[in-house]
Amino acid sequence: KVSIIVAVAENGIIGRDGEIPWRLKSDLRRFRQITAGHTLIAGRKTHESILKRIGHPLANRHTIVVTRDPKYVAEGCEVATSFEEALFRARNASEVFIIGGGEIYKQALPIADRIYLTGVEAEVAGDAEFPPINWEARRVFYKDTHAADSENEFASRFEIIERSPSPPVLQSYLDFNHVREAEQVEVMEKIK
């Protein structure tokens, strides 16, 4: 399962100068709880912002860093030179989490099975954006809210968004090549 986990401001901003442009401790705790024990895919800038903030890769998670630089070294992590290679390296994971940045999210959004979305109820300045979600192909599975308080700069809402199930494909059951009667064709056309 490919999942995106992201916090997005009302104006689509997810980052500013390699940093998270808000303080939401409840979201960081939820991020840790959801991703613990899983594989993460992060862009180089996202990985470096984590190193800058905490000094090491995220504990209790296997991280694959995506960079175009084939000589890039990410201590304690795997390195992939494309998003596709990162997905291949994560192929045995039960659920892989895409954690940013904007370009990685853009590549992951069309194939993501699930999105763990924290909607930050504010408009903030920034230089990294989350791509628009195609809501026709998605449905909100779970929703919760959190008010601003001493640990959370802004109010937020948390949603789990899943890909809408595709309608069943009946074409494989309809064998028009071996129909003997016109009546059967009519019934099969109605089924189709």
Image (spheres, rainbow, N blue to C red):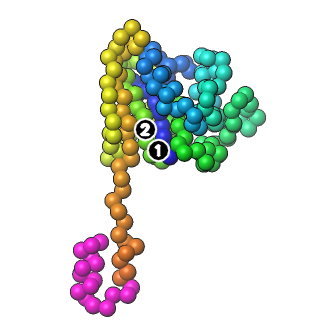
Q: Which residues are magenta?
A: 177-192
Within-10-Å neighbours for mark 1: few <14, some 14–19, many 20+: some
Nearest the eye: 136 or 58 = 58
Q: Quadrant of residue 118?
A: top left
Nearest the eye: 125 or 163 = 163
Image position, residue 126 (x, y; %): 47, 20
Compared across the picture, whether 154 is left or right of 19 comes to left
Q: Which residue is mark 2?
A: 115
Quarter the C terminus occupies:
bottom left
Q: Is 80 drawn above or below residue 157 in the view shown?
A: below
Type of amino acid at the residue the image marks with label 2: Ile
Q: Residue at x 37, y 66 (%)?
A: 169
Asked if the residues shown at circle 1 and circle 2 are in contact, with their CB atoms under 8 angstroms apart, the answer is yes
Type of amino acid at the residue the image marks with label 1: Ala
Q: Which residue is mark 1?
A: 112
Circle 2 SS class: strand
Q: Residue at x 35, y 77 (%)?
A: 174
Reply yes or no: does residue 75 show up in magenta: no
Image position, residue 39 (x, y; %): 59, 37
Image position, residue 102 (x, y; %): 51, 32
Query: Dominant secondary structure of the magenta stretch?
Result: helix
Image position, residue 119 (x, y; %): 37, 26
Q: Is 164 drawn above or below residue 65 in the view shown?
A: below
On the question of residue 128 being in view, the answer is no
Q: Residue at x 61, y 44 (%)?
A: 90
Circle 1 SS class: loop
Compared across the picture, whether 60 is left or right of 172 comes to right
Q: Is 112 drawn above or below residue 44 in the view shown?
A: below
Reply yes or no: does residue 185 show up in magenta: yes
Q: Residue at x 34, y 14 (%)?
A: 148
